[in-house]
Image (cartoon, rainbow, N blue to C red):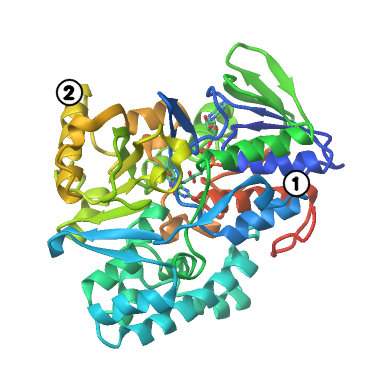
Amino acid sequence: MTQSPPQTAIIIGSGIGGLGLAGMLAKKGIAVTVLEKNPLPGGRANLITKDGFRFDKGPSWYLMPDVFEHWYNLVGEDVNKHLDLRRLDPSYRIIFRDQNNRAVDLHSDVSRDNVLFEELEPGSSKKLTKYLASSGYQYEIAKESFMYRQFDKPSDLFNWYTLIEGSKLHVFESMHKYVSRYFKNPMLQQILEYQMVFLGTSPYETPALYNLLSFIDFEMGVWYPMGGIYTIIESLVRIAEKHGTVIRTNTEVQSILITDGKATGVRLADGTELHADIVVSNADVHHTDTKLLPTEYRQKSDAYWESRVLAPSGFILYLGVKGKLPQLTHHNLVFPDQWKEGFDALFHDPKWIDRPSYYLCAPSTTDPSVAPADHENLFLLVPISTKLEYDDTFLEEYKQKMIALIAKDFEIPDLAERIVVEQTYSIKDFKRDYHSLGGSGLGLAHTLMQTAIFRPNNFHPKVRDLYYVGAGTNPGIGMPICLISAETVYKRIIGNKSRQPLTSL
Ligand SMILES: Cc1cc2nc3c(=O)[nH]c(=O)nc-3n(C[C@H](O)[C@H](O)[C@H](O)COP(=O)(O)OP(=O)(O)OC[C@H]3O[C@@H](n4cnc5c(N)ncnc54)[C@H](O)[C@@H]3O)c2cc1C
């Protein structure tokens, strides 16, 4: 922390963490400048507009509405005045390819979801109630005592409180083992495990504490802001600018300036130097560490970065399709022929799979504004290993295969002929657009050894007034989680040591 409260701040990167922090600091009266290399703010939560389509480039699930609401309240705003939120029903649809493409809808309404559970495993609805009660309890503990706190030293993680409460969080058991103790039916297991992909990891490796995602999914609902996810970014920009933040796009930072062990500003790619009392990097931590910091201030070795477990990258397709597609709901998940092998191909035995697990989002089924009349807006995401290689010819062929697979899985035989807009996006694009290590979509996966005290911290221990915000630091991946990261680093900057969410700025 600076000796006196900072008057000026530079934030490198306008991802949701960077913008969230900008809004908080600016509301507190600090003059904030956000520097973003890309043409549009938003980071991975970006936007592609083409021929009347408005494609959300990355995130599409609005989860943890309580966390968003809390952030907006803190900066004196009403989330509902900024976002026109709708609760989706069904929350999502799953197609089980190994069950002859059986489709099931999940509703985030236990009284309705119980029917499916009972059908698949008699007696399981009672177990679901118990499972969710435990997930809900864990979510509250995590929110009140873990997510908003700093992790600076081993005792911040390993103390009596966390050992007692943490033992209830099932930190040392894998998610798959934990779920298998409750449910025997593989379809039910998969329904409760698929969320691990949100964390960039596999249920066989993720600590079971993340079963709190089931509570978020089943009890809090899946929401959508009309106009698309990018309206969240637009509102964060609006709030930050209202309090005087200057956001400069197409402005790449080349290095962080350090004088006598203190961050003093940045040098831009064009050589201009900008100065501020504090510097915060929202860029990926690997990029900050290896490219923006002078060598003597690097925190981690090449060996450290090479040994990181990266969340998968993605093969992404943005498709504009002529005519309506009643076969689809807003969120559609297709589970693969072989569940465990799919995760192995992501993390242990990298390969392109011809019939992979995938996610297909059709926001235009909820929101006509994201596509021209009588068209659908589709986003396909196939999680893939960051270790895969490809060239343009391969990507084109894979695209054709995936379009044929969607056509088959969802019985849309003329899909290919109806496509009017298409764009692919993959590993190389993540590297180019976000300086992402390995081209990962999400960054550092949430394995146990990359969580809490083991995740890069939100400040530099040897450079005063240099901070980090976003998915690469604590608590981790996901839009609401990055807003929590913003609040945690905000607390560090203003010297607030509480473990709990703030009640005011
Ligand atoms: C395909 C995909 C789907 C996802 N789905 C969901 C979802 O459904 N729900 C959800 O909650 N989350 C989802 N996520 C995760 C979520 O999008 C991210 O965790 C979150 O947006 C990351 O925000 P961040 O604050 O870490 O910043 P980032 O989004 O990583 O932004 C960092 C910014 O820094 C900029 N930058 C980097 N280097 C420099 C430099 N040298 N100079 C200037 N600027 C620089 C980059 O251009 C970028 O704009 C998804 C992510 C992806 C990729």
Count residues near mark 1 (Cα–Cα under 10 Å), then give few for <14, some for 14-19, many for 20+: many
> Which residue is found at the position 65% from the left and 60% from the top?
149
Real-space CA distance between mark 1 and mark 2, rounded to the nearest whole angstrom: 49 Å
Locate the N terminus by quadrant: top right
Q: Which residue is mark 2?
A: 393
> Which residue is found at the position 58% from the left and 66% from the top?
157
Residue 253: percent from left, percent from top:
59, 23
Question: Quadrant of residue 142 in the image?
Answer: bottom right
Q: Residue furthest top?
A: 270
> Which residue is found at the position 25% from the left and 54% from the top?
334
Residue 195: percent from left, percent from top:
38, 60
Q: Amino acid at mark 2?
A: Thr
Point out the frontmost of discs 1 and 2. Answer: 2
Q: Which residue is mark 1?
A: 493
Left or right for 185, reference 460 = left
Question: Quadrant of residue 268 in the image?
Answer: top right
Taking the image as drawn, is residue 56 in sight?
no
Residue 39: percent from left, percent from top:
54, 22
Q: Amino acid at mark 1?
A: Ile
Left or right for 460, reference 390 = right
Which of the labelled discs sits on residue 30, or is there none?
none
Mark 2 residue element: helix
Mark 1 residue element: helix
Please tell me whether residue 413 is drawn above or below residue 106 in the rendered image.
above
